[in-house]
Image: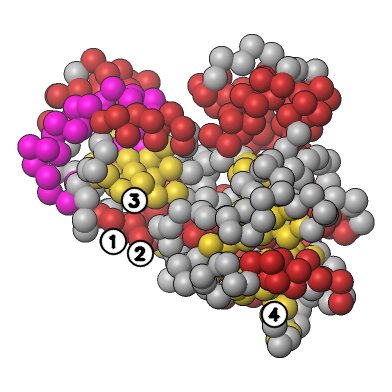
Amino acid sequence: MRLTKCADAHNDPFVSAVPRDLAPALRAAARQYPVVTITGPRQSGKTTLCRVEFPDHAYINLERLDLREYARSDPRGFLDEHRDGAILDEVQHVPELLSWLQVEVDERPDVGRFVLTGSQQFSLTQAISQSLAGRTAILHLLPLALDELQRFDKPPDTLFETLLAGAYPRVHDRGLDAQVWHAGYITTYVERDVRQLKAIGDLEAFASFVQLAAGRTAQTVNLSSLGGDAGVSHNTARSWLSVLEASYLLHRLPPWHRNVKKRVTKAPKLHFIDSGLLCHLLGIRSVEALRHHPLRGAIFESWVVSEVLKARRNAGLSPRLFHFRDHKGLEVDLVVEMAEAVALVEAKSGATVAADFFEPLRRLAGLADGVEWRPLLPRVVYGGLDPQRRSDLEVVPWAEIAQLPWD
């Protein structure tokens, strides 16, 4: 069912919305906690989701300077106006309000009263842990998962169209030119959000750093190399990567080593969360350019990781996503620690299944078998259309990734 007339973070009252996979977890959390917090990147649909799911709550956008000043100068009066419940959007702008909110919900712990949103996960999480620990559930809304994207009237048809368009709702809801939208998003991000997250004086250098980081998607982190190419120190590179992660542009995938072997790499892998933004940063402007780009495989790998990350976040779960690489050259793109099994995943952008897709999965399964108490589920997610079931693994077409259990 298509929903309409739900305001987004920019106060446009006619942004339509498709049902989001996070909605059941959001409703469940609101039945258990007095406060529910949703974090995620700007324009991922947090406000729309909250206004759809909580239509009787007042909506307060703390991007507005007058409301922000009111909440800062008179927090008690501000909360008294909304004792029956409210959506407080971009609450990271007024972190001191959370201490007053703690007092309010302790005095009246009715479930589901307040819904908070924020687009800066580190600063918001730190403020919440200090003031609302035990009083709020924290959920994460990322850009559209593939199954959500397919709920729009005209979703992308092919893999490369999907990767190039990315997954931010506004692009698909409005039929916007994805390249123009991504350019505006990056400009706004660098010029506004980065200043709020960290005191970065040279924004031009930071913008260059973001592009260099995009060129390293699906690679293990080498801070010295990245910093050297960007003309900044090792410590600055580390700090700036944290900024990208805090604003949900990328996800760092830690190494998996438990119960397998000791001599494994300790470096995480970088993965940009949205393939459309990633393509834009890499200068890819057409499907044909993407099809022949040398980083096509890396872009697809990051997309697969992002889809699994979204599936787990939409279920209200922590990521529990890893990569594996040992000193002998054995690599597996993604390891997912699920409740009852461990998925071993290789991502291959090619449309034809090749025998060498399977070797890393079988080697890692041999190492882990007998020491990992959960069953191992080797999977290849590839750019083709036909599923295959081998005796010891499954081959999954890219378009069916959302149909797999990842919890």
Say which of 165 and 94 sits in front: 94
Q: In the figure, is residue 369 to the left or right of 293?
A: left
Kindly identify the amino acid type of the residue bearing the numbered disc 2: Pro
Task: Identify the secondary structure beneath mark 4.
Answer: loop
Q: CA distance from mark 1 to mark 2?
A: 6 Å
Q: Position of residue 108 (x, y in %)?
A: 8, 41
Q: Is residue 63 above or below residue 3?
A: above
Task: Identify the secondary structure beneath mark 2.
Answer: helix
Q: Which residue is under mark 1?
A: 28
Q: Which residue is under mark 3?
A: 51
Kindly identify the amino acid type of the residue bearing the numbered disc 3: Arg
Q: Which residue is under mark 2?
A: 24
Tell me the magenta residue range. 87-114
Q: Give yes or no for contact between labels 4 and 1 (Cβ–Cβ under 8 Å).
A: no
Task: Identify the secondary structure beneath mark 3.
Answer: helix
Of marks 3 and 1, which one's residue comes earlier in the chain?
1
Of marks 4 and 1, which one's residue comes earlier in the chain?
1
Of marks 4 and 3, which one's residue comes earlier in the chain?
3
